[in-house]
Amino acid sequence: MTVTEDRPAAATGEIGRDRRRKEDQRLITGRTRWTDNIQLTGMLHMAMVRSPFAHAKIVSIDTSAAKAATNVVDVYTGADLGESQGVLINAWPITPDQKTPVHLPMPADRVAFAGEIVAAVVARTAAEARDAAELVDVEYEELPAALDMKEALRDEVLAHPDLGSNKSALWVFDSAEAGTGGNVDDAIAAARTDGVVVEREFRQNRLIPAFMEPRSTVVDPTGEQNVMYSATQVPHILRFALAATTGVPESKIRVVAPDVGGGFGGKLQVTPEEWLTWCIARRLGKPLKYTETRSESLMAAHHGRDQWQKLTMAADKDGTLTGFKIELTADLGAYVAVVGGGVPVLGAFMFNAIYKIPAYHFACQTVLTNKTWVDAYRGAGRPEATFGVERMMDELAHELGMDPMEVRRKNWIRHDEFPYTTVSGLEYDTGNYEAATEEAMASFGYDELRAEQQRRRESGDRVQLGIGISTFTEMCGLAPSRVLGSLDYGAGGWENASIRMLATGSVEVTTGASAHGQGHETAFSQIVADRLGVPFESVEILHGDTQVASKGLDTYGSRSLTVGGEALVKAADKVIEKAKPVAAHLLEANVDDIEFEAGTFSVRGTDQGISIADVAGAVFVAHNLPEGMEPSIDADATYDPVNFSFPHGTHLCAAEVDTETGAIKLRKYTCVDDIGNVINPLIVAGQVHGGLVQGIAQALFEDAVFDDAGTLVSASFVDYLVPTAADMISFDVHHRSTPSLTNTLGTKGVGEAGTIASTPAVVNAIVDAVRHFGVNDIVMPCTPERVWRAINGSGAGGADPTTGDAMPHFDAEGEQA
Amino acid sequence: MTRISLTVDGASVSEDVEPRMLLVQFLREKLGKTGTVVGCDTSNCGACTVHLDGHSVKSCNVLAVQAEGSEVTTIEGLARDGELHPVQQAFHECHALQCGYCTPGMIMQSVDLLNDNPKPTEEEIRVGLEGNLCRCTGYHNIVRAVQTASGQEVNAS
Ligand code: FES
Ligand code: FES
C-alpha cells in the first residue's frame, strides 16, 4: 500500500498549521469513490430523452422501438409516472405572491426549456440505454418561447401560459421604509443639482457552474431503507425533499454523497434526474444508475448569475456618497429552483458593500423564461452585487476626476467605526479596510504601475495598461435561523456535529456539513485535535451520509467552517465536561479541582493526571465510574449562528490591452483578504486561487450563449470556455486576520471570496486601460472582439452593450443577449 | 465483439470488447479501474488521461481495440512498491488538488510533460497542461507541484 507521508505531530496547536490534507491519499492514487464508480449487483442503467425545443407541447411519444431494443428493460414517459414521480421544490418563495410554475421531474404535456426530460430509458448497460433513447419518437408542437428576459417582462410571449405572466416576484428593500437610512430618490434629486449622479446599466452574464464531475445518481431500493447515492452538496436537504414530495417516510430514506467532484453551488439543487432515478428504481425494485454526459450537464444542470443591473449612484462633489439605487432584473429560467429568487435577493445586503451610504433602495424583479433554470453559483447574489457597486465606484471616480482608491477611502467604514450597522440593516462586527488596502497596494506596486500606465498613455503605446480595484466584503456563515425565517426561507441555518470517543483512543467525528473538495476532513480534524488535545491522526471526520451524520444542513454559502466548525467546538466542549467527573473519580479528586489542558485532566496543584483517551477507555469498560453515571462521554451539538461573518479584502488587477487586436493579458493580480482566524493556510490559499479563476473567467471567457430558438450553443467544453492553465497567471495572495467576533474560532469563511472580488477587479482594469478611447463599459465576457469594438465603436463602447457576441462563429445565428 | 489482450498497470488482461468501446470505458467498466474518470464528451477536459506505451493519451479518445498489445498505465499503477510517484507526492505537498476529480488526469499529464521536458519553465508547464481542465485550484498550485516534482525552485506565494 502506498502511504502519504505526514509530518510528525507537533506538540503545539493544530489550528493555523499548514497541514497537508488527509483526503489527498485516495485522490492521488485513484481509489476514490465517485458516484459513477458504484456498481451494485443487478444494477440497471438509465438514459434520458430530452427536448430539443425551448417551448413545445408534447403531442405524442412512441416508445415501442426503444422498448424492443436489445436489453432494454422499460421506457417511461411523464404520463406513465404521473404523480408518483413527485415534484421539485422551491425552498425560498421571496414574496407571498411569487408566481412559481409546478416543476415535475418529467412533464407529460409541455416542455419549458431545451434539455427538459421527456422520456427515460432503462437498459442493462449505459450504452444500450443511450442507443435506445435515440429510438424514442417524440412529436412536438412548438410554442413561442420567452427567451430575452427584458422582452419577457412585457408578457407578450409567456414562458408558462397558465401563469398569465412571466413576472415571478418583485422584492424590495428601501432604507427609508426600513428606518435604516434616508429616501434615495430625494438623495438623487439633490445630487442632480448640487452633486453628481452616475447612472449605468450592467449585464451579469449567465454562467454555468461546470463542476468537473458530471452529476450521477444511484438508487438502491432493496432493503427496508432505500438508499440514494448522489453527487450532491446537500444530502440532508435532498433526503428532506424526497420525503416531503414523494410520500416515502424520511426514516426510510438514506442519502449518501460519496466523494463529490466539485459543486460551487451547482450541486445544491434537488434535480429531476435524482427524482426520476428514485421513482423508477423503486418501481422496478432494482438498483439503477443515471450519469449525465457533459453536454446534458451544461444544458440541464442549473446556471448562475444572469441579471441586468440598473444602477444609480449619487454623491457630493467631493465624492461622498449620498445614495445608491439598485433595480435588478434576474432571469430564473424555466423554473424556480431550490433557492431561486433568493439568490439575487441576497444581493440586497451586499450592494452597499463596505461603504457608508445614507440612502439605499434595492428592487429585484425575477422573470421566468424558456431557458435553463438559474440558481446559486459560487457567491450566489454577492458576486453580482459586488460587481455592480465596485464598477460604480470606478465610474464615480472617473466622473469626479478622482483616483478610484481615493473615492473608496472617502466612503468606506473606518476600522474604528466597528461594529457598524449598514444601510441594508446588517451589523458588521470587525474589519480593517485601510490595512488590507495598504498591504495590497504595497505588494502590487500600485504607484509604479500607475506611473507605467501614464507613460504608455502619453507615448500612445499600442499596448495600454489598466488597473482595476475591488474592495469587497461578503456575508458568510449562512445563516442565523431567525434571519432566514424573516426572509421566508424554508429551513434553518444551524449545523450539527457529534463526537464519539472510541475505546482504543481514536475519535470519530460526524458533521452535517458535506464536503466536495474543501478539505473538511483535514481542517475539522485540526479543530477537534486542538480542542481535545488528541493527535491529528487520531481524528476521523465522517460526513455525507445521512445514516452516519444524521443531522445537518450541508455545505454552501461559506458556512462549513463558521457554522459547522462552531458546532464541533461546542460538541468537543461537552465531551470534556462529561469526562471531567470521570477523571475526578479515577484520580480520587474533587471535580472542581480538575483542569483540562492539551488532552490531559489533572488535579490542580499536583502532578497527577489522566489523558482523555484513558478516560474514554475507562468509560468503555465502565467498571469504575462515578455512582449513577451514564457510561458515555460522547456528545453532540447543534449550533445556530448569532450573526453572519464578514470577510473582506482588497483585490488589485493589472491588465494589458492590445488596442489593435483587443487582446487582453493579465499582468499582475494581488489580493489581501481578511478572513479572520485561519485554521489551515494552505487550504485557504487554495480556495482563494480557485475562486479567483472562476471570477476572472466570468470577466474574460465564460458565457452561456443561447441561439434565437432557445438552444444552448455553448453546451460543450469546446464552446463553454472554462479557462486552462495556459489562460491564467500565478497570483500574489495574502491574508490578514481580524478575528470574527461572531464565533469562538474567530473564523469568517473563505469559500467564495476570490470569486466575488475578482470579476469587477478585472473589468475595472480593462475599462481603465481603454477609458481614454471614450469607453465606460465592456460587456462580460470581455472578449477581444468586444474590447476591439469598444475601442473602435462610436464613442462609448458600452453604449450598446447588447451587440457583439462571445462566439464570433455563432454570429450567423445571433444571440441577442 | 473483438478479443483484445494488453497490459494494464503491469497485469496482463484479455477481454472481448465491442469495436466501439472506448479505452476509458474498458478500463472503468471491464477492469474496474475507476481511478480514471470521464469529465466530458468532446475530448476537452483531460480527466481520462492515461499512458499508452509510455505517452499520455486521453483514453476517451482511443478505442479499446486500438490498445491491443499495448501497455497502459493508469493513475492506479503509478505508485510502485508502496512508494508514491514524485509527481503524486508533489501534488499532495503543494495542495494541488481540491475535489480531486481532475487529479488522476492532471498527474498523468504532468508525468508525461516531465518525461519530455524535465526542467520546464512556468510557461511550458502551463502550455503543457492546457488539455486538462481543473475547476477547483485555479492551476496555481498545480504549476507549483510540477515545479516541485521537477526539482526546481518554486515561485513564492
Ligand atoms: S473525458 Fe474529457 S477528455 Fe476524456
Ligand atoms: S481539483 Fe477539482 S477539478 Fe481539479
Image (cartoon, coloured by chain):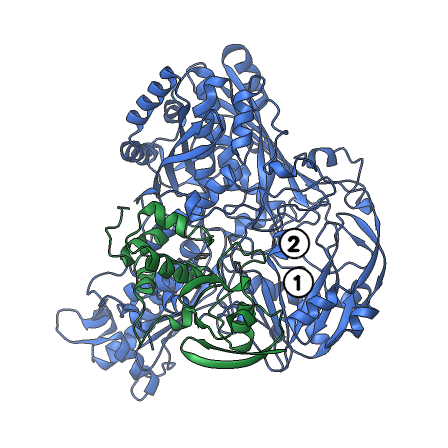
Q: Nearer the viewer, residue A45 or A572?
A: A45
Which chain corresponds to the colour blue?
A
Residue drawn at 80 percent across, 35 percent down:
A156
- What residue sits right under mark 1 in the picture? A273
Q: CA distance from mark 2 to mark 1?
A: 10 Å
Residue A519 in sight here? no
Horizontally, is A212 left or right of A656 in the view? right
Front residue of this view, candidates B124 and A227: B124
The answer to whether the residue labelled 2 contacts the one labelled 1, judged by CB atoms less than 8 Å apart, is yes
| Numbered disc 2: secondary structure | helix
User: Which quadrant holds the N terminus of chain A?
Assistant: bottom left
Identify the residue at image location x=44%, y=16%.
A400
The residue positioned farthest toward the top in the image shown: A193
Q: Which chain is green?
A: B
Task: From this view, report whether residue A543 is shown above or below residue A404.
Answer: below
Residue type marked 2 = Ala
Q: Is residue A420 at least partly visible in the picture?
A: yes
Residue A807: give its label: none
Point 42% across, 34% down: residue: A665
For residue A73, above or below residue A87: below
Quadrant occupied by the C terminus of chain A: top right
Where is residue A83 drawn, in percent x and y?
Answer: 78, 65
**To which chain does the residue with label 2 belong?**
A
Q: Earlier in the sequence, mark 2 or mark 1?
A: 1
Residue at position x 36%, y 57% in the image? B113
Q: What mark, if any, has residue A300 been given in the picture? A: 2
Q: Give the chain of mark 1.
A: A
Name of the residue lying farthest toward the front? B69
Q: In x, y percent, where is residue A210?
A: 54, 52
Mark 2 Cα shell of 10 Å, populated few (<14), some (14-19), many (≥20): many
